[in-house]
Image (cartoon, helix red, strand yellow):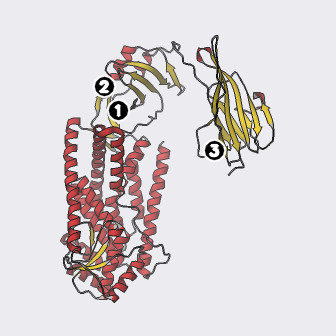
Amino acid sequence: MITEKVFYVALISFIVWYVFRREWRYEKEVARTGVVMEYHRGRTTAIGSPMMFPYAMLAITAVILLLNGFGSAFEGLAEMVYDFLMTISLYYIVLMVTLPFLRKIISARACAYLWIVPAALYNFIYVFNRRNFSVPPFTVRIPRNIAIAFAVIWLVGFAVIMTWKIVSHLRFRREILENAHEVKDEEILALWDKEQDLIERKRVIPLLVSDKIASPMTIGVHDGALRTVLPAIHYNIEELELIFRHELRHVQRLDSETKAFLAFMQAFCWFNPLMWFATKKAAEDMELSCDEMVLYNADESKRKKYAELLLETAGDGRGFTTCLSATANSLRYRLKNVMLPRKRLSGAVIIALVTAVIMMTGNIIAVSTSYGSIDDVILHDLGDYYIKTTSILTADDYKYKDVYGWDEEKLTDYIGSLEVTKISNIMDEPQGEKQGLFLAMQGENDLIWLSIMDDVLDVQVVGGGKASGLYTIEDSIDWTLINSCMDYTVENPDPNPVRPTLGLFFDPPLEPYEEALHAEDRLIRMTEGSNVTEFEKEEHGWSGVVGIKLDKAFLEFSYEPEDFLIEIEGMNGEGKETVKPSQLGEGNALNLKPYHARYTVYGTFKSHKRTTYEMAFYFEINPNQR
């Protein structure tokens, strides 16, 4: 499991490194030469959509509400939000300490990405770590009533701030565009078209002039809503070229979407000052990164002209806009970088390493509102309950064994007293190294499955329920006590007849399928003691494989037949053939025909209760059909 996780983390980190490095080199080449070497109209240079996190959050919320209802969904979402807030706060503390050093050695664009990466990755990290069963090393317990009260306050704050952000953007957009007019100067429009070609725009962005702004800006989130607006100030062609390159670099990087994403993050973590600081710094680094690329390989005179532009503009950065002007706090730093450029690394390696670290440790802290004894947290809704079935994973041979005798009172008292903490609403199969205990607890209305493996508990409520999910077990499990409750000498007091199945494995293997292909089956006759039941012949399907040349099929019965034989019928007039078990290879290996053939396996099976099944199984192999 860890090896698989490391593989996927390495793969995703490599992709992030490759894409960032490729786009960084592409931007530098365009800035240096002023031409596009390989034209891909509509190309963006962002690693991914900055709005992925908000959209994913909305989708996850909708799915959880649909599956679990509002009550359970609200608690689950609240815990997920708490997890995120804890994790990202730790990350931002580390980043704030290290950023002054990083700014000296890596590009401003990489610094901007470092503010965004953890939030953009969070949904994937959350599901990835939980699905791959990475148990958080630290769990913060919050009383349920306090957590719910805080979640309500958080939700109200989120709704208010997000609404304010959206309304402010729309009002600002309407204010600056209301009396704006399109640029008519042909020389300016020709330069605008040329610069848009440099970023490989597919859709032309309207170029407007407005007397409501003091600095050039691009406003709008989605592609069709983008507008680049100039203030009612005269700029010469050299100045316009710098302005256009700055704004269009923002466009190609989807920075307007990033601004909307940062607004979402401010609303999402509205009570956390670290998030407000982080979004502010991310916006500053976005501007710095555009400065870097606009002035890449530029001479001193162009840098001086650009610095004058920054000093002369005093913009208004409201809404989801990219704006040439600098805030008072960042102006000094931007001017220093403009006039005294320093050679920096792209930062692709740093971003890839940060991605890997976040994915490996993304759920280092979990927040839980469900904790206490198993009786109080999980079994309290069952009313009077009893152990219906028990099985155990033995430490000596690591095999599952059904147990039919146990000390009910002693075992239920011990299991019910174990202290647990819920860490995820996602159910998964616990992975253990030594032994485990599996119980079906039958209550007055519900049936709950408890799977205890090492220090982890998996709970599944039949029919669904808020107790379902994964828990850490706070106590050390006393396996000696559990084994003392078991009576392994008791035979199954009520064995059920089990109808056999036939699984098929092939040579060569059917990659990437790891499980057996199950043959279609038909029950011919069932004998229970002196009672014989004949079944009418019924229509059946044919499991099979098409278009793949296979040499052998390995027959794997769910339990050994008393006797069986195989009938093979060619589907193109090749005739019928019968194969006996003695003609099969090791592992019931059946040599398959090189032509389209159907295989019928007839067998007799003795099951529990002295029940005998006479079965027919059907599958076909057609190596030639495409």
Residue 97 in sight here: no
The spot of residue 74 in percent (x, y) is 28, 41
Q: Position of residue 489 (x, y in %)?
A: 52, 12
Above or below for 487 versus 540: above
Specify whether residue 38 is in view.
yes
- In the image, 142: left or right of 498? left
Residue placed at 47% from the left, 27% from the top? 435
Q: Which residue is mark 3?
A: 510
Q: Quadrant of residue 21?
A: bottom left
Left or right: 17 with respect to 501? left
Question: How many labels were placed on the picture?
Answer: 3
Q: Nearer the viewer, residue 292 or 525?
A: 525
Q: Which residue is mark 2?
A: 381
Badge 2 element: helix
Residue 545 appears left or right of 309: right
Residue 85: give x, y in percent of width and height.
Answer: 27, 49
- Disc 3 residue type (three-letter): Leu
* Residue at horizontal 19 percent and vertical 79 percent from the top: 211
Q: Which residue is mark 1?
A: 465
Mark 2 neighbour density, 10 Å: few (under 14) some (14–19) many (20 or more): some
